[in-house]
Image (spheres, rainbow, N blue to C red):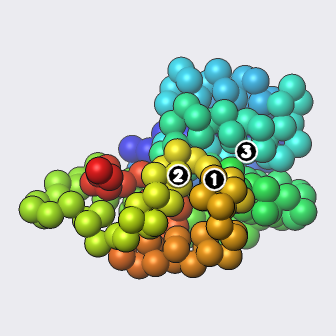
Amino acid sequence: MLKIIIAEDDPYIRLILRRIIEKISGLEVVAEAEDGIKLIRQVEKLMPDVVFLDITMPTMNGLEAAKKIFSIDPTIAMIFATAHDSYMREAFEVYAFDYLVKPFNLDRIRQTLSRIKEIKAKERGDGSSATQPITNRLTGREKQILRLLKRGLPYKEIAAELNITIKTVESHVTKIFRKLQCNDRFELIGRKDLKID
């Protein structure tokens, strides 16, 4: 059963999201928060698998809250559910799993949650029997970038740290995904079998 927290200052939107989530088996809404500070406290206490959060919330906005959640546990899937379509880039920079704009597309929400369930099931049931670490497939530079990705650094900071362009970082990340058979950064961060020397 995946634990979910909904963070949204509008009680009507929280109710809509709760009703959608509760119709999907294997998911449970364990808490709701109407502001960012309360959300962080709930995350620390309940350690959810998924957090739905709005961009604009009292006490702490969704982007700042997402950064703190990532520092608490980078495997928590964060889904932004908001009326603002102008913060998508910033949301993915803080490792959002998805970005949903109101009015919500119900099929999109179901697909996103189904994908998270699949990834979490793979993480929890992964008993890798490979004799060689999968990261041996990576070049030295790709291993450097993987380390920084797993630390939660956005592409811009990785580029600055390694003194390369963002475009070069993106190119390396595409190769890393292909070699490690990952679909996105969230899946990459959650993988327990990615040991780097």
Residue 52, disc: none
Residue lying at 53% horizontally and 21% vertically, measured from the top left: 45
Classed neighbour count for the residue bearing mark 1: other residues with Cα under 10 Å, few (<14), some (14–19), many (≥20): few
Residue lying at 30% horizontally and 63% vertically, measured from the top left: 135
Read off the residue under disc 3: 53
Specify whether 154 is left or right of 12: left
Foreground of the two, 163 or 39: 163
Classed neighbour count for the residue bearing mark 3: other residues with Cα under 10 Å, few (<14), some (14–19), many (≥20): many
Read off the residue under disc 1: 161
* Residue 65 percent across, percent down from the top left: 73, 36
How far apart are the two marked residues, 2 and 1, measured between alpha carbons? 9 Å
Residue lying at 26% horizontally and 66% vertically, measured from the top left: 136
Q: Could one spot residue 131 in this view of the protein?
A: yes
SS at mark 3 in the image: strand
Read off the residue under disc 2: 148
Q: Quadrant of residue 164?
A: bottom right
Specify whether 67 is left or right of 197: right
* Residue 118 percent across, percent down from the top left: 39, 62
Say which label, 1 or 3, has the lower sequence index: 3
Indicate the amino acid at tag 2: Leu
* Residue 89 percent across, percent down from the top left: 78, 63
Specify whether 58 is left or right of 163: right
Indicate the amino acid at tag 3: Leu
How far apart are the two marked residues, 1 and 3, measured between alpha carbons? 30 Å
How far apart are the two marked residues, 2 and 3, measured between alpha carbons? 25 Å
Number of numbered tags placed on the structure image: 3
